Image (spheres, coloured by chain):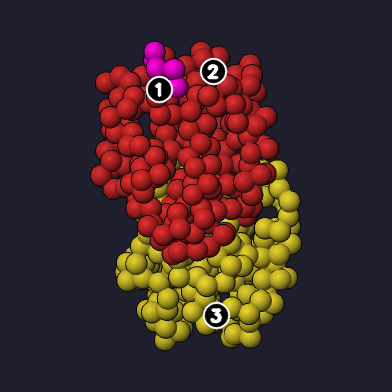
Chain colours: A yellow, B red
Amino acid sequence: MNNTTPNISRRAALLQASAAGVGAAALLLAAKSGQAQPATAGTNADKPMMAMDAATKMSAPAGDLDIVKFALTMERLEAAFYAQIVAAHQNKAYLTARQFELTQQIAGAEAAHVQALEAVLTGAGETVPDAPNFQFPASVFLSPITYAWLGYTLEEIGIGAYLGAVGSIQSDDIRKAAASIYGTEAQHAAILRSFAGFDFAPKYYESPLTVDQVTQLITPYMVA
Amino acid sequence: MTESPDLTPSTEPNSVSPATTRRSFLALGAVAGAAAIVLPALPARALDLGLASELKFLENVQFFQNQFFSRALRSGLLDPLTPGEGKALLTIATQDGEQARWFSAARSQRGLMPSRATMPSSMTEPNFQMKNNYASREKFFASAITIKSTAVGAFHGIVGQGGKADMVQAMAALAGVQNRHLAILKEMTGLSPFDNFVTPLSINEVGNTLSKFGFGTEI
């Protein structure tokens, strides 16, 4: 159930990159989104990512690009997880219809985040890192509860990583983009927590994670 | 199995308090307790950056949301709510109130307003005149989603302004919870709970949208 080619040294480098990276990946994606659009509501579910072109052409500080790379790793982890869940359900249905429907939506969003982050790096003249391999417990492909638990856990790690990094992002475009993606991660976390039987919002604020904490939390899912 | 929250209407005119009844207190004890212990710090320079008016505005938005959801629970028009729906709306109302009081506490610590610690809420919190938001269950949820989406945009707008790192982080920490609320409200109505991206809104955009529901009528 793993994906892509392992690249341990690249993986190690990514894991040691800037802390807030996870959130940053989301940030970059958001930067490309329709932030420049006049809006009557705070969300933008169906509008195209109008700012994407601008984001992919922007010049970002080197530290911001490190964050983007780290964020790309996190987004790739999440994208791989949900893609494998979708494939597992298609092989042997074990999710409810609603769970599967929403999992497909999350998988699509995470894949779009990966593409957007890669485009930002390419636009900045950076080499896109090779994708690492990921591994997940077999139980997540058999149990809806276990799937939801790991799903919201990964989302919470991403949320914490974003909060840990957001203050150090120098580019306004990247920060806005990151915030946009971060918002969707919080939405994912709420629904997956409810699938697992937990409160969708356990407290009235989110908590940041350090780089070391994020690295420690996602290492078990990286193939050495 | 957790105990269902007690949704008995309170005699309090405005907010749903976690301590309204013992049962609701127990249902929300963990949330309230955590909030009391770990209050995100408002950066000292936040007010130096000219954000004082924005912070006051967000405080009022959160009081408005707190009252919007609190009154819905007391209106009786939403019956029959499932236990899960009731608990979700109570959580949203409570956390919106906690966020509003975080702004109040932070501003008090900066000496911009008298301490509210010893004052009753009726003396310190705005009282909004809601505009026909509870005519039906459908009307309520449609209004709730628009209001919550607008609040999400308001927080993201402040985050997008940048500034001191801890200020940005604090606003983002609150914005994340608003996104959780929005997702669960959409899920309760059968809509897709997810947005591909979240759009930041200006204060003017937020004020204009929320005024349709009674924001700006506070006394």
* Amino acid bearing label 2: Leu
The stretch drawn in magenta includes residue B11: yes
Residue A3 in sight from this viewpoint: no
* Camera-nearest label, 3 or 2: 3
Q: Residue at x 52, y 76 (%)?
A: A64
* Camera-nearest label, 3 or 1: 1
Nearest to the observer: residue B197 or residue B16 = B16
Q: Share a chain, discs 1 and 2?
A: yes
* Amino acid bearing label 1: Ser
Task: Say which quadrant the C terminus of chain A sits in.
Answer: bottom left
**Magenta segment boundaries in residue numbering:** B10-14
Q: In this view, does A135 lie above or below B152?
A: below
Q: Check disc 2 and report the residue beneath it.
A: B78
Q: How busy is the neighbourhood of tag 2: few (under 14 within 10 Å), some, or many (20 plus)?
A: some
Q: How busy is the neighbourhood of tag 3: few (under 14 within 10 Å), some, or many (20 plus)?
A: few
Q: Check disc 3 and report the residue beneath it.
A: A61
